Amino acid sequence: MRSLRLSLLWGSAQAGTSLTLASTAWMVSGLTPSPLLNSLLPALGTLPVLLPLRRRASGYGLQLVSVMLLLGVSLGKLSGWPATGLLMASLLAVLLFGIGGELSQLPLQRRLLRSPGLSIEGLRQGSDLGSLAGNLLTAVLFPAVRQFVPALLLLLPLGATALMPREQAPVGSADGAAEATAAAAALPSMAPLPLDRHCVLQGLLFGSLFALLPLWVRAVGAGNCFDFAMVLAAYGVGRSLQGRLPVLATWARYGLMAGLLLLTQVQALPGWGAVLLFVPIGALAAAADGALVDRLAVRGDAPLRWQTLQRSGAVGGLAGSLAMGLLTQSLGLGQAIPLQVLAFVAMALLLGRPPRPAVSS
């Protein structure tokens, strides 16, 4: 029962995170039509992975502060404040949110995993369901001021655990405490998490895909916040279905995602059909995540492996979002999806190459 409560606590925070980031991305796409400036938003959100931060659970408080700042921005937008100032405040808030997440996520995961019966798989399921719930809330709550208040309320419950002194944090059992202590000792609080080349490449792909998605939906697809959130929700539903996929070669996953993205550009396809294509894209992306984490088995415990995936993916996402912003600033926003298809095809070809034979001396 306790493990279920902790999973829900984690899932609630992930719902608040998804609602915050999706709502901010849509709000910024309405403040500026520039692809480069829009790409700065996810780039700043992932920038903290490159900073030498001392990880601690109390860093979660920065995320709460950033949501309150975004709430102020949304109120200023309703009041007609200058767009430039609102844009700068939004970018600052997302940077603070990213710093808070980088500081607190690994310590919080390990603190929660000290409870008996709770596994990293349970936290991952809570994350996926929470993200899906956050995206659905983005669709039904509008304007932004109605989105950031629920986001703050969803983030608050985990704040009690995050801000609790370490010595007062609940410990489920002596074995759990010993395991958590040993895992924490294996990674100093300021030590940079290791990077993995394949995780970086995957992060580059998805960073470039989602960096300009809200602006593309608004400007090219002539959609609204509901349409944007439905794309994210379809992707989230797909991620929850990854276990139903047949076993595929690594290169085949990326090739299929390239084909599905290409299908979204078919003129005869209705809007809802393009949205539904993001369900299998999400399932394939989640399966690719799982395969990458399995490859990292020698890197350490499960939380560390997932954090390695997230950090490496964030580094790639930082490069991917800025690269896509620069390219579409020069070539036009309408080229975003074709460029993305080419990137997925390149990834499939790269991973599909046979390994080089060993050279005998």
Image: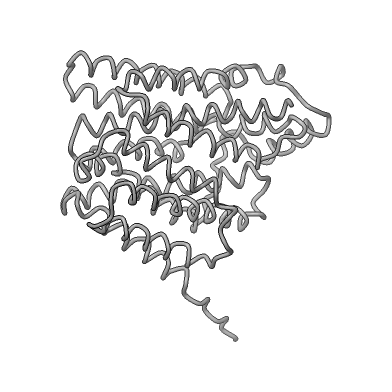
Q: Position of residue 112 (x, y in %)?
A: 67, 29
Asked where in the image residue 341 lies, by quadrant, the reply is bottom left
List the single residue furthest toward the bottom: 361
Number of numbered discs on residues: 0
In this rendering, position of residue 305 left or right of residue 330: right
| Residue at position x 57%, y 62% in the image | 246
Q: Nearer the viewer, residue 312 or 274?
A: 274
Asked where in the image residue 179 lies, by quadrant, the reply is top right
| Residue at position x 21%, y 50% in the image | 328
Specify how the rendered protein is coloured.
one colour
Q: Position of residue 128 (x, y in %)?
A: 54, 39
Q: Quadrant of the N terminus?
A: top right
Q: Position of residue 317 (x, y in %)?
A: 39, 47
List the single residue furthest toward the right: 174
Q: Quadrant of the C terminus?
A: bottom right
| Residue at position x 52%, y 51% in the image | 286
In this rendering, position of residue 334 left or right of residue 48: left
| Residue at position x 46%, y 23% in the image | 63
Q: Is residue 11 above or below residue 85?
A: below
Asked where in the image residue 120 lies, by quadrant, the reply is top right
Q: Position of residue 85 (x, y in %)?
A: 21, 21
Q: Is residue 361 above or below residue 248?
A: below
